[in-house]
Image (tube, rainbow, N blue to C red):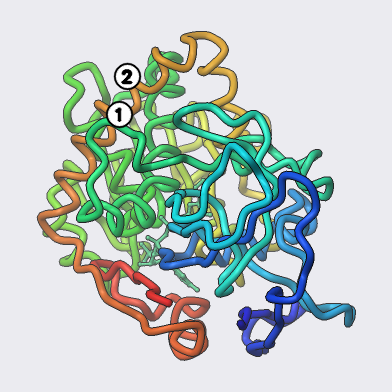
Amino acid sequence: MSEFQIRKDNYLTHRIVDFDLSQDELQENEVIVNVDKFGLSANNITYAVVGEMLGYWQFFPPHTNDEGWGVLPVWGFADVTRSNNPEVKVGERIFGYFPPATQLKLKPTHVSDLVWVDGSSHRQKLPQGYNLYRRVEAEPGYHPSQENERMLLFPLHITAFALYDFFASKSWFGAQQIVLISASSKTSTGMAYGIQKDQNAPYSIGLTSSNNVETVKGFDAYDAVIGYDDLEHIDASKPTTIVDMSGNKAVIGRLHKHLGDNMTFCSNVGFTHWTEGGKNLDIIQERSEMFFAPTVIQQRIQDWGMDGFNQRSFEYLAHSYACSRNWLKMTDVEGISGVQSVFEDLCKGNVPAEKGLIVKL
Ligand SMILES: NC(=O)c1ccc[n+]([C@@H]2O[C@H](COP(=O)([O-])OP(=O)(O)OC[C@H]3O[C@@H](n4cnc5c(N)ncnc54)[C@H](OP(=O)(O)O)[C@@H]3O)[C@@H](O)[C@H]2O)c1
């Protein structure tokens, strides 16, 4: 059994650590699952960037006790291989949040037909959406052939749905155009497909690296695609709202300065350019706000009920997944050692935008 660990102070330093759960006696209601596969994208790197602030290091404490190492969460599928829980049988397949590791111990609670919640004590104060495991074989419409798409895109496109819904509910902050920064990211394209389908939504502009401009045009997601170097070509006479996935303070500052009073609102969602933080005095703080999808989703589940949320979000995801299928190339990565071999490229933004990394254990 092995797990992938990274240094919390230098993500490019990583290692594979062996561990053994085979002799562990299971406590009441505990199960062991074998992780089968998971997706990887810039989102997983962001879990490290905001790991201390938002608690992402706490989900899966490393099996070693030495200071300074952490385990990044990933989204994937696993099978129950041992069970001391009368409601969860060996062989059950689940979808949810895992470590990049071959095995994990969980404690299913609140078991219902479709879901259960990990009741492990160290996860109780963390956002509950991440502790939910879906019992996929009980889901109507579940098919194994859709697993790769789901584990890669679900966490990103459910955020895209939450963003789309948030902006639509605020009448797009009065904007005539909306700029999405780090437009080649799957979270951005997921939102752009929702905007494209909505006749009341503003004109959309994708802002991306110059070497990604042609690729992003090919995604057919935005009304216009512009490179970071050319962002001053955006029409600053129109009220404009911004969704930022990059965390690149220099780019955000330049865009805010260029738009001035016409920058109606900026949603700070991600940190794909995680090395480009710091301060920038041109950023208009009073019209900027952090966006944390789990909180917004929880609020909508309260507003609409679980069924209402599922109905609206599934409809959205069906469309955004279908649009992404036209260009997204799933690429297999073999085993935990494979994670090591792609990790540097992932950290440095060297994975081509059209690639979807699927790790198979
Ligand atoms: N707030 C929330 O609740 C929430 C939820 C989900 C996702 N997010 C965030 O949304 C962001 C997008 O995630 P994703 O998984 O959709 O991304 P992704 O598909 O893996 O995005 C890849 C793109 O990100 C940019 N990039 C990645 N690493 C880079 C680096 N080191 N330097 C410069 N550019 C880099 C490049 O785009 P460009 O050339 O276009 O810049 C690259 O093509 C992440 O930061 C993620 O955490 C936030």
Q: Circle 1 sits on which residue?
A: 314
User: In the rendered view, does 89 fall on the left or right side of 224?
Assistant: right
User: In the rendered view, does 107 fall on the left or right side of 91?
Assistant: right
Front-most of 337 and 312?
337
Secondary structure at numbered mark 2: helix
Q: Residue at x 50, y 83 (%)?
A: 336
Please identify the quadrant where the C terminus is shown: bottom left
Front-most of 111 and 53?
111
Q: Is residue 195 above or below residue 174?
A: below
Cβ of mark 1 under 8 Å from ligand 1: the answer is no
Report how many numbered discs are placed on residues in the image: 2
3D distance between C-alphas at marks 1 and 2:
5 Å
Determine the image quadrant of residue 170. Answer: top left
Tell me if I can see residue 291 in this picture.
Answer: no
Q: Circle 2 sits on which residue?
A: 311
Tags 1 and 2 touching, CB below 8 Å: yes
